[in-house]
Image (spheres, rainbow, N blue to C red):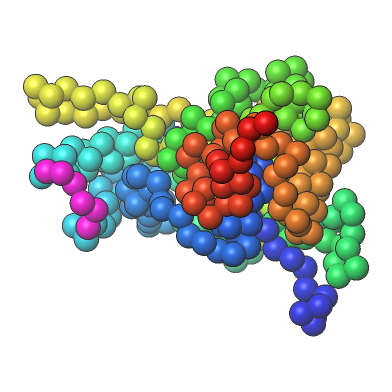
Amino acid sequence: MSDADAVPTLSVEGLRTGLRCPRQYEFAHVHELEGEPAAGDDRVDLLRTALCDALRSADADREALESIAADRLATLWADHDERFHSATQRRHERRVLEATAAAYVEAVGIDHAAGIERLEAEAIGGELVGPGLPLSSTLELSEPSLETDAVRIDATVDYVTVDGSSLVGVRFVPTVAPLGLLRYRSDWEGDVAALFTDHFDPESAAFDPAPVGALLETAVVLDGLRGLRDRLGLGDRTCRYVQIPLADRSGTAVNWVRDDVETSLEIVDLTDGYVDHHTFGMTHEHRNETVDDRLAAVATELVSGPYDPTARWAAIEDHACPTCEYTVCCQDYIAREVGFDG
């Protein structure tokens, strides 16, 4: 295939950024200007790696899973050079990670390890455990250009397991707080559908890029899982998508007297909140035509440009600009800051 025939590629992170602000997408994903990583991301990566290594190496045995995860985390932590204000803080952050690993094993780790074993016995080659296991979905652009009529969107999960008759993609995230309403609603109809459609309604003041982006991500991941399922010969299973937070302190309790840390995990299955049951009834697949159509439209806008935020600027300025790292070089923001009244 020639370069002219190549299918352009987006990422789910790019989709989320484009929903927050098209200009921010241009800086981060077109010009590839790197921003500062969020605080604690490195610690999440350490724990993600330790848990995936444990799932890859251990069978569905609690002691083995806990032991391998703890040993791997200790090794990674010894080389972790994050600057802390004191040795006490460093010890505390390590205990939080250890408590999170134990909470994961207690909540779903053993069951997920057993599911991975089952899949490995059935799969025709291929990796089931990451971290960063790649998935992709290719879709038609809503307005095909002269160069291409399709786009590939890349996503990752950290491992794939089985739950009952479903193939489950699991992704470790820092927190599920950005999911907003999706944390508490398990049906598309009603609040979730309204949240999604209102975000794109030019007559509405709603601006909810984070949960909307999560729904677009769910569409990509589920389609990617269907492709992985077919490539690995894993039968006719339906697919599901789950996120597990590794740095959400809302479930962490510290007993400073006993120097003890305990935590719990809020595990979120995004599948049911995405599924349009009318579409599901026709296709018997976890799909949503409203989200899928909008996914194609957003992808088309990002592939074709220009990255003009004018149409949503009032909402972007209120919600995205205060925490944006690119305001110093953003012509839209600067023009507003130096503009004259009257």
Q: Residue furthest top?
A: 190
| Rendered residue at 32%/40% (across/down) | 101
| Rendered residue at 22%/57% (across/down) | 81
In the shown orientation, is residue 199 left or right of residue 341?
right
In the shown orientation, is residue 303 left or right of residue 83?
right
State the predominant SS element of the stretch in magenta: loop
| Rendered residue at 21%/29% (across/down) | 261
Is residue 168 among the parts visible in the rendering?
Answer: no
Q: Residue furthest bottom?
A: 2
Q: Nearer the viewer, residue 205 or 246?
A: 205
Q: Which residues are magenta?
A: 81-86
Quarter of image, res 39: top left
Q: Residue furthest front?
A: 342
Q: Position of residue 219 (x, y in %)?
A: 71, 43
Q: Nearer the viewer, residue 272 or 179?
A: 179
Q: Position of residue 36 (x, y in %)?
A: 41, 53
| Rendered residue at 21%/43% (across/down) | 94
Q: Position of residue 38 (x, y in %)?
A: 40, 46
Is residue 3 among the parts visible in the rendering?
Answer: yes
Up the image or down, 160 lies above or below 318; here it is below
Up the image or down, 166 lies above or below 342; here it is below
Q: Nearer the viewer, residue 135 or 153?
A: 153
In the shown orientation, is residue 185 left or right of residue 201?
left
